[in-house]
Structures are given as C-alpha cells and as structure tokens.
Image (tube, rainbow, N blue to C red):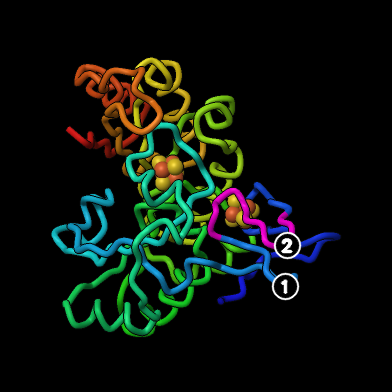
Amino acid sequence: MKEARFYIASEDGVQCLLCPHHCRIKEGGRGICRSRECHDGKLSALSYGKPCALAIDPVEKKPLNQFMPGTFCLSLSCTGCNLSCRWCQNSSISQASPEETESTILSPAEVVDLCLNKGLPSIAYTYTEPFTWWEYMYDIAVLAHDKGIKNILVSAGYVEADPLRDMLPYIDAANIDIKAMDDSFYRKYCGASLEPVLENILSMKNAGVHLELTNLLVTGLNDSDEQIGRLCRWMVDNCLQEVPLHFSRFFPMYRWKESEPTPKKTLLRAKETALNSGIKNVYLGNI
Ligand code: SF4
Ligand code: SF4
C-alpha cells in the first residue's frame, strides 16, 4: 500500500492535510474522499496505481479550447473526490470507494509508456478529483514531463496550498470547475467551500499554468445574472479576463433531478454577460 503524503499523526490515528477538509481519521477509517485510509498509524493512498477509467479524448473535451487544440490526450482517473456535488455526472467513480469500482493495475511508468506508444502528447488527470490521488498523479506527472508529455489537470481546485505548490511545476494546463461565486452554494450542494478554490486558481495563474475555467449553470440555483456577473467581476478584478471561461449545460442526474436542463437562452445570456464584463473568450459546453 502506498503511503500518502501531507498528513500528521494524531491521538487516535492521523489527520490528512491534503485538502481543506483536514479529515481526522481513526485507525481503519477513511477520509471524506473515501480513498485515503489510516493503516498502522500511517495514511495510505488507496487508489495509487489503480486507475478506474482510461480513455483517449480530444483535448477540447476537458474542456481546454486554447491548449494544443486539435490534439488528443490520455484521460486517466482513479476513484475518489473530496466534493459531493449532487449532480455529479461521474458519481459511480467519484462517490465510491476504490474497492467498489473496477480498476486496472498500472504503474506510473506504464501510464507514460502507454501515452508514448499511442503517440499522445498529453495526459489529463480527470473525471474524479485528481488531488485525492495526489501521489499517483504526481509520480506520473514527473515521469511524463521527463519524456516531454504535457500534464493536464481537470479539477475542482479544492486542495491545500502545499500539495498544490509541489504539483504545479509539473502541470502545463488546468481546467478548474468553479461551482458558483457563492460559499453557501458550495457548502449546501457540493460539500466544500469557495475561498480555497479562488486562492488556488490565482496560484495556478501566477505559476504560469495555462488556465481555463468552467461554470456549470444549474437551473434556478446559480444561473442568475447576479451570480454570473459576480464570477466575471472577480475574474476581471484579478486580471483573469484573458482566461477562457466555459459555461456548461446542466442535465438532471444523480441526486439532483429537481432542476430542468439549462435552457439555451440562459447559456446565451451568460455568454453575453461575460463578454460585456470584459471576459475575452467565452465558450458554451454540453450543448
Ligand atoms: S484528501 Fe480526502 S482524506 Fe484528505 S482531507 Fe481531503 S477529503 Fe479528507
Ligand atoms: S467535484 Fe466533480 S467529480 Fe467531484 S463530485 Fe463534484 S462534479 Fe463530481
């Protein structure tokens, strides 16, 4: 079993410091993400080397519209997420324990070889929350960089500063899913909080990562002019107006069937609001 990084011993187990949840985990127990377990007083990264999803995707599907357009990437995922979005479209792998999903055994070197053999220029860490399998992503990313393969992070950005700082030198591009410019929305519907996400987006930008942002518009919850305007103002105030912004269409699924699919006119209105706010590149997704 792979020992995790970013934890400290506590009275009756460990405390994980990988993400702002700071889970206190007793012997034999797991954190909120279900993929980190306390074992003999140590924290283990349970999904290390066991990807549960592998695919070849156009890079635009991540979505990244301005990073190596027209190329394909190896998309890789392990079980686990530290958020619990009620409409998660990948809930069967994000809201599950590693032993509940089918996985294959693949060392970091084998992942990189697979990418080279397929002639793919990049690897995307995606579908679930890659930071919850930080150790595996890091070991692959270091080897990949060595071979000239680009690393793409697709994440909700809910991670502590130290693990983010250590990962950033190996990340070439990132799409961060910003759920809403509303902390109560994060807490009520996603089981997380807004502030660390905003700080991490700025850290990524400052580190020179090619950054794009996604905002899923859930009908009646975060699709008001006021909410969209707040996101755009924050971007402009923080010199992110050149960062591509993707508004994505919601479809009812998992534990949220109450809202209608996002009407096309809502997406068009969001795009207009963003352009009027000064955001230079706005895209609509899932339509
Ligand atoms: S990464 Fe997982 S175990 Fe660690 S603090 Fe976050 S949710 Fe808890
Ligand atoms: S952050 Fe992404 S993978 Fe995790 S629950 Fe939310 S939508 Fe699903």
The quarter of the picture where the N terminus appears is: bottom right
Amino acid type at mark 2: Glu
Q: Viewed as shown, does residue 120 lie left or right of 101? A: left
The span shown in magenta is 25-35
Residue most extreme to the left: 70
Tell me residue 48's x, y (percent): 48, 71
Label 2: few (<14), some or many (≥20) within 10 Å?
Answer: some
Tell me residue 14's x, y (percent): 75, 62
Q: Are marks 2 and 1 in contact (CB under 8 Å)?
A: yes
Q: Which residue is mark 2?
A: 27
Image: 159 above or below 279? below
- Picture residue at 30% right of the left edge, 76% below the top: 149
Tell me residue 95's x, y (percent): 45, 46
Which is nearer the eye, 260 or 169?
260
Secondary structure of residue under mark 1: loop
Tell me if residue 152 can be seen: no
Residue most extreme to the right: 11
Which image quadrant shows ligand 2? top left
Q: Earlier in the sequence, mark 2 or mark 1?
A: 2
Chief secondary structure of the magenta portion = loop
Which is nearer the eye, 227 or 52?
52
Amino acid type at mark 1: Asp
Label 1: few (<14), some or many (≥20) within 10 Å?
Answer: few
